[in-house]
Image (cartoon, helix red, strand yellow):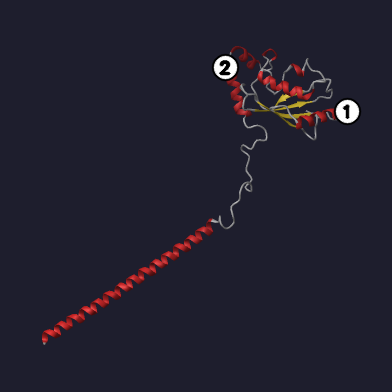
């Protein structure tokens, strides 16, 4: 859809810019605003699924498009996140009275956003764009809620700009110290210590063996001398 910036008179553009800036600074509860610096006539938003509804826990992206006759003509709303709702068509178009016969120029964009959020709490099956959702809402609410919750879990969990699935920067988070955390350096120090211990152990074992051999040799010499002395005494 083409931008209508060139089609709107300057005083309307100033009013839109002022309102969008106010919404971005102080958005309605549960709604985030993502204004575009390039096209003020297209406003992107994210609506939190209200608690107590099948949409709870979901983040639903939406956009409002201001036509060339705004504010005499209401903006058009589209859900960008797939949703199972009676008043949302298969292409995301939204059917709500405030965007049709109940529109008044003085209502403003904040009122539009709040009305669409309320639509998630109180669907209107009488003006259904999704006939199946409207029928289930009237005839089998349990099945309607189950379908709506399933699509919420599939398409709306995580929200826009979320980090799920996004690659992480390897430079993010704490970095290991260059030396203290170097496993090769730790391994080298450990290996040197073990080698020294083994060397000392080997030297100790060698010394013990040598001492044992010397002691044994000395004992043999002493024993031999005693035997020779006894034989000499017997000769006398």
Q: Judge whether residue 9 can be spotted in this image.
A: no
Q: Assign the N terminus to one quadrant of the image.
A: top right
Q: Assign the C terminus to one quadrant of the image.
A: bottom left
Most extreme residue toward the right, as rendered?
A: 10
Q: Looking at the image, is 199 positioned above or below residue 169? A: below
Where's residue 77, x and y in %? 74, 23
Q: Which mark is drawn over residue 142? A: 2
Q: Nearer the viewer, residue 158 or 227?
A: 227
Residue at 76 percent of width and 22 percent of height: 111
Q: Is residue 219 left or right of residue 66?
A: left
Q: Quadrant of residue 5?
A: top right
Q: Nearer the viewer, residue 14 or 155?
A: 14
Where's residue 176, x and y in %? 59, 52
Q: Residues within 10 Å of mark 2 (few under 14, many from 20)?
A: few
Q: Residues within 10 Å of mark 1 (few under 14, many from 20)?
A: few
Q: Looking at the image, is 175 positioned above or below residue 231? A: above
């Amino acid at each position: 859809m083409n931008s209508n910036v060139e089609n709107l008179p300057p005083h309307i553009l100033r009013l839109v810019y002022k309102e969008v800036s106010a919404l971005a600074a102080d958005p309605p509860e549960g709604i985030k605003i993502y204004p575009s610096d390039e096209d003020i006539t297209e406003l992107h938003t994210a609506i939190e699924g209200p608690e107590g509804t099948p949409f709870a826990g979901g983040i639903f992206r939406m956009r409002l498009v201001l036509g060339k006759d705004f504010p005499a003509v209401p903006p058009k709303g589209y859900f960008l996140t797939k949703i199972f709702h009676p008043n949302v068509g298969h292409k995301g178009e939204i059917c709500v009275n405030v965007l049709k016969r109940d529109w008044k120029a003085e209502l403003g964009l904040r009122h539009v956003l709040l009305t669409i959020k309320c639509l998630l709490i109180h669907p209107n099956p009488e003006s259904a764009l999704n006939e199946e959702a409207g029928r289930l809402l009237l005839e089998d609410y349990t099945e309607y809620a189950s379908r709506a919750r399933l699509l919420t879990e599939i398409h709306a969990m995580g929200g826009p700009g979320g980090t799920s699935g996004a690659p992480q920067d390897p430079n993010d988070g704490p970095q290991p110290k260059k030396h203290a955390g170097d496993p090769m350096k730790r391994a080298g120090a450990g290996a040197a210590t073990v080698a020294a211990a083994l060397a000392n152990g080997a030297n100790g074992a060698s010394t013990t063996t040598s001492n044992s051999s010397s002691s044994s040799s000395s004992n043999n010499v002493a024993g031999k001398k005693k035997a020779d002395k006894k034989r000499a005494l017997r000769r006398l």
